[in-house]
Image (cartoon, rainbow, N blue to C red):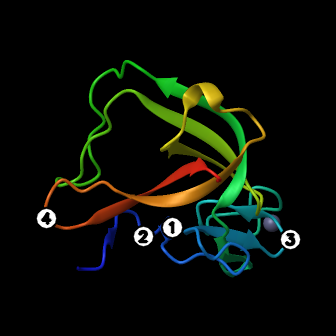
Amino acid sequence: MSTPEILKPALYAAEGTSTLPDHPSLRGGKCQCGYVFFPLQTYGCEVCGRTGDALQPVALSGGGMLIASATVHIHAGRTPPAKADVKPHTAPFTIGSIKLDDGPTVRTLLVDVDERALKPGQRMVSKLVSVGSGAQTIVDLRFTTAS
Ligand SMILES: [Zn+2]
């Protein structure tokens, strides 16, 4: 079996963090002032305005708390796939806002969830799912409810 290809390697990694080793980590950044953000960028800290080397990469744990979720039943048009051999999203799909344990809030697609059972405050974890439509295994990041 070949190693799965990560769809967006700039945003997340298959490896977890020391606090949450079993779930993929997100590639965030941390400023000298202590502010943690996602995704990583070096243009400037939203809090103190520091730029460049003051902003360093940090792996964020793939765990957090659900803030809100919404299920899209009718999708206006097809979402263009990120790559030619990646399946497009098809409705219905569920989007969630998740406040990560490490600070930042991310908006992400949820998988393997019962939308009627989703409640704010629920524990969520990251997960890589196969999104490829061809021979190559391509994985993308999603969140699901913690078991
Ligand atoms: Zn800062």
Categorize mark 4 by other alpha carbons within 10 Å: few (<14), some (14-19), many (20+). Answer: few
Q: Report which residue position mark 3 lands on.
A: 33
- Marks 4 & 1, CB-CB < 8 Å contact: no
User: Which tag, 3 or 2, sits closer to the chain's start?
Assistant: 2
Q: CA distance from mark 3 to mark 2?
A: 26 Å
**Residue 95 on image: x %, y %:** 53, 36
* 75 lies above or below 129: above
Q: Is mark 3 within 8 Å of ligand 1?
A: yes
Q: Report which residue position mark 2 lands on.
A: 9
User: Which tag, 4 or 2, sits closer to the chain's start?
Assistant: 2
Q: Secondary structure at mark 3?
A: loop
Q: Is mark 4 within 8 Å of ligand 1?
A: no
- Marks 3 & 2, CB-CB < 8 Å contact: no
**Residue 71 on image: x %, y %:** 51, 26
The three-letter code of the residue at mark 2 reads Pro
Q: Nearer the viewer, mark 3 or mark 1?
A: 1
Observer-nearest of 98 and 39: 98
Q: CA distance from mark 1 to mark 2?
A: 6 Å
The three-letter code of the residue at mark 4 reads Ala
Q: Report which residue position mark 1 lands on.
A: 12
For ligand 1, which image quadrant applies?
bottom right
Q: CA distance from mark 3 to mark 1?
A: 23 Å
